[in-house]
Amino acid sequence: MKLTKSIYLLIAAIILNAACVSLQVSPVSGNKRVYGYSWEQEKQIGKEADSEIIAQYGLYDDEELAEYVNQLGQELLEVSHFNREDTPSEYRGTEFTFRVLNSPVVNAFALPGGYVYVTRGLLGHLDNEAQLMVVLGHEIGHVAARHASQRAAEQQFGQLAIIGGAVLGQSFGLDGGSILQLSSQTAQLLFLSYSRDDERESDRLGVEYSAMEGYEAAEGGEFFTSLKRISEKAGYNIPSHLSSHPDPGEREENIPRLAAEWEEKGYEQSIVNKEKFLEMIDGLMYGENPREGFEKDGVFYHPDLAFRFSVPNGFEVYNQPTAVILVNEAQDAIVQFSISSGSETPESAVKAFLDQEGITTVEQEVMNVNGYPGYNAEATAQTEDGTSLTIDLTAVDYDGNIYQFLSYTTTSQFTEYEDKFKSVANGFQELNDPDILNVQPVKLDLVRAERTAVFSELLPSVLPMNIEPLDVAIINQVQLDDIIQRGTVLKIPVQ
């Protein structure tokens, strides 16, 4: 999703504070390249950003799965450019951290200095260990080639980096609302758009590392087929000449070709480990966790915190661990819902915001929100380019928390959106529907096909949480009309 300029200017200017262009030796090529950070700075930046990533997305609560991913990552690291005879001493033995994030999006990314993340959403779309190894190797490759630091150097030369997705080059992996909860430097790194050459280099390295460990690296191409199908289903097709990343279709063809080259060099690639991988993801949570909030028919529900509020027609919901972001289709009106930490009353929460430099209060008043104490204010602010924003802020005291709705758009459009902004806050109320209060997350259940049949015929007649048959076909890396042999293990979403 593309964010409007006013959003960035309202929260922070995205800059790379520590960047200082210099020539340094690449651990991949051994030649000198231009970087924006020293290697020590990269490690420090990654360490600082890691805590923000954990706070933003949360870690998936499965220690055995987390250790499994970490073990595989560490195996790849041993054959990577961080641990070779000719590895420069400053890189040798770099410690890496591999984490599984509690996010349903299909995403993997790396931060400078040795921090690699995969989501539960990505794991659910993989079919075997070999595919996971290519993904992990790809992300290790980004760190080894120091791609983020190279992009930082380009910025120092005045080249504006495109804000995009970090997931193996796919922009659908991280939603726009995320950036509102991150520091400017972490947001810059997380949304940094690697070039096509960066992605191709990491693809090569991911295949190289996997092949050296004996994995069937060509399997990685199947995952990029899944990425292409996800993209097509979501309507995110981007002509390759307009994208800063290689098309998934190109990559599904290139990865088997790269794997074949390593086989010709004498690296036997026979390890797939499908059974072991599927065993590790048996019971994996699939899709959004409804316990943590979900939108249905124009209402946002949060079963764990027992509240609900209205979602205006035409607004898309981005539910994050620390906030819920509502964005309209034109991306020029925003509502951010969150808990006001440190505030004891709705009035103190609102006034803390109004007291910030650059905020001009228009009016404020005590209010009642469906029987709960509230406080509302209208204010204005200006972006750095002189655009005037009008802000509507409502705070509510409910069940021991102070919740606040921060809504804003340009002043010229405020009257157009004012009623919608107020409908969100005024719709806040207790959730008492027992069916919604007791809703449980969807999980992947491993089921053996009892007969040979077309895939679509083996699916349950009713799938949970608006999941479509095509979604299930994609996570199983098959087509709906494929013939599935009796005894084949399938991943079926159940609730």
Image: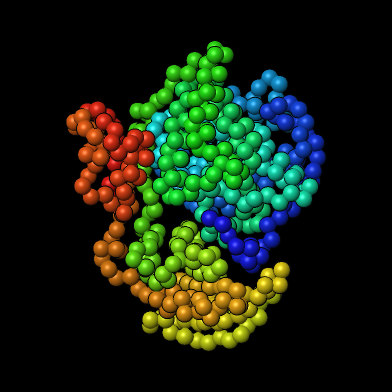
Can residue 391 be seen by looking at this rendering?
Answer: no
* Residue 326, x across and y down, in percent: 48, 65
Viewer-side residue, 479 vs 184: 479
Relative depth, front residue between 29 and 247 = 247
| Quadrant in which residue 123 is drawn | top left
Asked if residue 458 lies left or right of residue 222, the reply is left
Q: Where is residue 271 in the image (x, y as percent from the top left)?
A: 44, 21
Picture layout, residue 83 above or below residue 347 = above
- From what the image shows, is residue 407 above or below residue 78? below
Of residue 239 and residue 16, the one placed in the foreground of this image is 239
Q: Is residue 488 visible?
A: yes
| Direction from residue 129 to residue 80 in the image, left or right | right
Which residue shows up at 38% across the image and 83% down it? 371
At x 78%, y 31%, the residue is 32
Q: Where is residue 335 in the image (x, y as percent from the top left)?
A: 51, 69
Q: Is residue 102 left or right of residue 363?
A: left
Q: In this view, does 345 lie above or below 227?
A: below
Q: How is the image coloured?
A: rainbow
Total labels: the figure holds 0
- Residue lying farthest to the left in this orientation: 451
Where is residue 462 drawn, in percent x and y?
Answer: 23, 50
Residue plotted at (38% across, 61% down): 294
Instruction: Tell me if residue 254 comes above or below residue 469 in the rendering.
Output: above
